[in-house]
Image: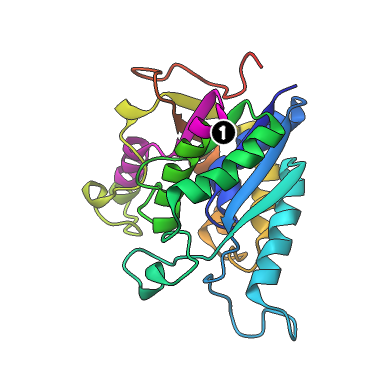
Amino acid sequence: MATLVTFHAHPDDECINCGGVMRKAADEGHRVVLVVATRGELGEVEDGFLAPGETLTERRVDETHKAAEILGASRVEFLGYTDSGMMGEPTNDAPGTFWTASVEEAASRLAAILVEESADVLTVYDDNGGYGHPDHIQVHRVGLRAAEIAGTPRVYQATANRDEIKRGIERARAAGDETFGPPEDFEIGKPEAELTGRVDVRAYLSAKRAAMRAHASQISEDSFFLAIPDEAFAGSFGTEWFIRAGQGPGITETDIMAGL
């Protein structure tokens, strides 16, 4: 049995980015630990959604624990930073935000967990945080440094296959669906040539979707994640993509826990 630590910026990021590999690892007998940098304090919620006296922070922590149980995580830890908001917002620079945190100090907090857990594998995000969110970019920076401090041997950068998404947009637009803008304007994830890992998680999509549903304050039933048909969901979320330094060129890994 090995230990996977998966590091994320906000509650609900874990099920979207790594829900499949988390459940897969747990089902194969590995220990799964979820670490979240913030409690997602700046998430939006409709009036009347929260119970009287309940804060969004409390709700999102509770949702995280429920989702983590679905995904097979044995331990959930929050590093204690505050949600920074989208890039360019005044909240980025507020005291206590993850974006303003010292990388060394935050990495030391994460490294302590990695050492305590004798982590074999750590997941973070790519250097643009997938889509440019400051907290996601900070996950990349802090995670890589924490792995250095702790000596964690395998570090995977969770990302998206930008070229595959663009091909999907092209097909949709050719069929008359103008939901998305021109594919050349799409900058989420990384080009296919930079990816080194592709994990088929279609067998774990029911758990992945159930974990998304557990984050009801942020992922509503009519959201893209839950409203699309099962076949479309499998096409969008049935593969999880990674970059691992020193691997490649091309896809060389299909299981981040292989050999452990």
Q: Visible in this render: residue 231? A: no
Residue type for callout 1: Leu
Q: Visible in this render: residue 150? A: yes
Name the colour scheme: rainbow
The location of residue 34, given as percent across then percent down, is 66, 45
Decide if residue 95 is on the left or right side of residue 31. left
> Is 70 drawn above or below residue 121 in the view shown?
below
Decide if residue 16 is on the left or right side of residue 195. right
* Magenta residues (range): 148-171
Which residue corresponds to mark 1? Answer: 122
The question of residue 165 being in magenta is answered with yes
Q: Considering depth in this image, is 233 or 63 the residue closer to the camera?
A: 63
The location of residue 75, given as percent across then percent down, is 75, 44
The question of residue 28 being in magenta is answered with no
Seen at 50% across and 67% down, the residue is 96
The location of residue 198, given as percent across then percent down, is 48, 26
Name the image quarter holding residue 88. bottom left
Q: Considering depth in this image, is 227 or 27 the residue closer to the camera?
A: 27
Seen at 44% across and 16% down, the residue is 252
Decide if residue 206 is on the left or right side of residue 153. right
> Is 238 drawn above or below residue 197 in the view shown?
below
